[in-house]
Image (tube, grey):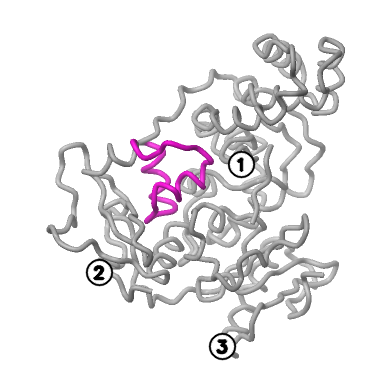
Amino acid sequence: MTNDSAAAGRAPGTTAATPGAGRVPAAGEQAPGRRAKGPTPVLSPRALNRATLARQLLLRRTAMSPKAAVEHLVGLQAQEVKPPYYALAARLDGFAPEQLSTLLADREVVRMVTLRSTIHLHTADDGLALRPFAQAAADRELKIFHKGLAGVDLDRLALRARELVEEEPRTMRRLREELGPQWPDADPRALAVAARCLLPLVQVTPRGLWGRSGQVAVTTVEHWLGRPAEPAAARQDVVLRYLAAFGPASVKDMQAWCSLTRMRDAFEGLRPRLVTFRDQHGVELFDLPDAPRPDPETPAPPRFLPELDNALLSHADRTRIIPVVHHGRTWRVNTAYRPLLVDGFLAGVWGLTDEALVVEPFEKLTKAQRAQVLEEGERTLRIVHPGTSYDVRFGTVIS
């Protein structure tokens, strides 16, 4: 499993959302809002920022249910336990961590390796369909360990690993120990990695539950959900969902999001149903005709996001949210810090100590911005630490 790392003026067509935003016209239907032939409209970084924030539910919070939000966002980055909870706390009105925890306990959402060969939290339906969609990324990861798998029959390995984890959820250490004797000349770690790459393994609860959690133990997603895997999601269908959650976007943007290649054909097949723009560098961007593209001057309140939030990781060109001057500032050695957005862009990091939520801005904030950050921080505390005496402070987070 890999780890996620780290102007052309106001654009024509950057209007506020309209009823039915994000609806995709059927094949052969005239795309609403399709422009007459002429120069392709250019979207400034600020216009892209506001459009992306709107799709990410970060421009205005929504009353959408947690499960619907997870589906709309095509999953949440979940390498650690708490990020999905923080991600929804920033996006949803009335959210309580127990809501997402209940969905996990009831097996309506699952934690598993999918996009970019990293752990995501998906709805059960998406877990079944997106895992085979992302298989090529898992295959590439598997090739990294080929020396440790010399002479191993991968089909036999997958069959034996499936028998073990469906008999009883196994930790990765236990899986290594039980597979090793059957292939004594192989690297035990490579055997476990191969099992994870070959099989759709889900992390079983209590791992991932709010306030409870536990060590990582896995079984197959089919066994956990009690139903067979879905066929791999069609590439064009995933393109449409990606644009609804992350657009406007280029082909390379989507490839960065899912770590798959050769997506151009899927975009080209959809071209009659989409609208196109250019960014400030001339890169072609695709979008759904009715998806929200707010005015670039739309106010964007501060947002406290979890480390490795997909809003910051899902484009080849991340300057729509991360200013060039702040590139890499949410990372230090092997530590990922939680990003703070101010006016829609990365402007600092935050963390929780034993007594406070600490905010470290990268640059001086205005008096109004500081007040807004404090207010948003207090709201975050009410959700993730209700009933405590924590406060919000400005200080040092990156040591």
Task: Residue at 57%, 84% (x, y): give it.
Answer: 369
- Quadrant assignment for the N terminus: top right
Counting residues from the N terminus, which is met first, the one under dot 2 or under dot 3?
2
Q: Amino acid at mark 1?
A: His
Of tags 2 and 1, the one toward the viewer is: 2
SS of the residue under disc 1: strand
Q: Which residue is mark 1?
A: 120
32 relative to 149 in the view: left or right:
left
Q: Which mark is residue 368?
A: 3
Residue 297, image quadrant: bottom left
49 relative to 371 in the view: left or right:
left
The Cα atoms of the two marked residues, 2 and 3, are separated by 30 Å
Q: Which mark is residue 12?
A: 2
- Quadrant assignment for the C terminus: bottom right
Residue 226, image quadrant: top right
SS of the residue under disc 3: helix
Q: Which mark is residue 281?
A: none
Residue 106 placed where, x, y %? 63, 34
315 relative to 286 in the view: left or right:
right
Q: Amino acid at mark 3?
A: Ala
Counting residues from the N terminus, which is met first, the one under dot 2 or under dot 1?
2
Q: Which residues are magenta?
A: 237-265
Depth check, front residue: 172 or 88: 172
SS of the residue under disc 2: loop
Residue 298 placed where, x, y %? 39, 75
Depth check, front residue: 386 or 271: 271
Task: Residue at 47%, 65% (x, y): give it.
Answer: 320
